[in-house]
Amino acid sequence: MSVSKGRHRSSRVSRRTILAWLAGAIGVVAAAGVTGFELVDHGVLPGKQVLDELDGGCDVTSTALSFASLGPSLSAQFNSKARNRSVGYTIAYPPGYHVGDELPLVVMLHGYDNNHRTAFFGMSPAQAVALTRHGARMNPVALVTVDGGNGYWNPHPGDDPQAMVVDELIPLCQRRGLGRGANGIRMMGISMGGYGALAIAERHEGLVSSVAAISPAIWTSYDQARAANPEAFASKKAFDDGNVITHASRLSSVAVRVASGVDDPFHPGVVTLAKALPTASQVVFSSGCHTEPFFIEQEPPSLRFMSLVDVHG
């Protein structure tokens, strides 16, 4: 058994960057008056999380990760017609299982500026399916990660990572015996990937049996999304089609777990989502920001949720 002692801390930036951010935020606040302070407090401006990190508002309990002996994993590429490029992927098997074994499948979607190798924080895909708790293993599941780019897992002209996942990646895995049959596909993600997991589950009803979103990057309006990241959605129609709040009722037959830190800039959007989710959904709001320590804290319970049989009926 291997153990990671979890000396994790916030994804902090340099003092110079912090001061530059604060200077910019203060400049906007000075121009906007009270409204500016409200924007900072609600996380629309970067000063809120920066200040939270400085005063310890983002601190969470350091999470110790323990793993059984790792199962096999393989990384390769395939030519994606949906994305018009070659994409990398990794398939990881739980301890005691081998390539060719039939298993339920967790599709793990990475966050912004990450890829199939770095979809998790503090662990590899192989470690993710070998996690233990008090010496006990999770129920066995396989896991796949894939390169989705920075387009928020939304369709864009010439690049559709969502179609890549649904029409190419999942069939590729099913041909290997993974994710077949009822309850076979489960969807998970962090930040941008958390949004993507919810969006795919909603837009492809009946595809997944469960979804777990850690700190999902959710905006409540197209204007808000465009101001923060103009490349996230190709158009207002694309935002409306992929609005996970307004389409939350489509998750009525899906087991849902959502976790968000109360000082996360995206938290207001997650709170709005929580109100729209089916009543049986598992929603976790706790201390933390949109930072690595919170992601790592929520990865083990989210993976256990993915592996449970009883949450899938």
Image: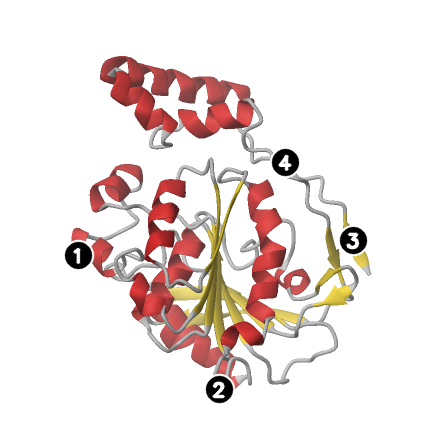
Amino acid at dot 3 = Val
Residue 52: x %, y % from top left: 50, 27
Q: Residue at x 61, y 48 (%)?
A: 297
Direction front: furthest residue: 279
CA separation, marks 2 and 4? 40 Å
Numbered mark located on residue 237 in the image: 1
The residue tagged 4 is 9
Please state which of residues 174 and 6 is positioned toward the viewer in this rendering: 6
Query: The disc labelled 4 sits on which kind of residue?
Result: Arg
How far apart marks 1 and 3 lie (CA) works out to 47 Å
Q: Could you tell whether 200 is left or right of 76 in the image?
A: left
Q: Residue at x 46, y 30 (%)?
A: 49
Mark 2 / mark 3, whichever is N-terminal: 3
- Horizontal arrangement in the rendering, residue 118 relative to residue 210 (left or right): right
Residue 201 left/right relative to 128: left
- How far is mark 2 from mark 3, CA to CA? 34 Å
Name the residue at 38% across, 26% down.
41
* Residue count near mark 2 (Cα–Cα under 10 Å), binned few <14, some 14–19, many ≥20: few
The answer to which image quadrant residue 46 occupies is top left
Find residue 221 and report its image quarter.
top left
Q: Sequence-wise, which precedes: disc 3 or disc 4?
A: 3
Q: Earlier in the sequence, mark 2 or mark 4?
A: 4
Q: State if disc 4 and disc 2 touch (CB < 8 Å).
A: no
Label 1 is placed on what type of residue?
Answer: Lys
Task: Specify the label residue 3 is tagged with.
Answer: 3
Q: Is residue 32 in view?
A: yes
Circle nearer the N terminus (2, 1): 2
Identify the disc placed on residue 181: 2
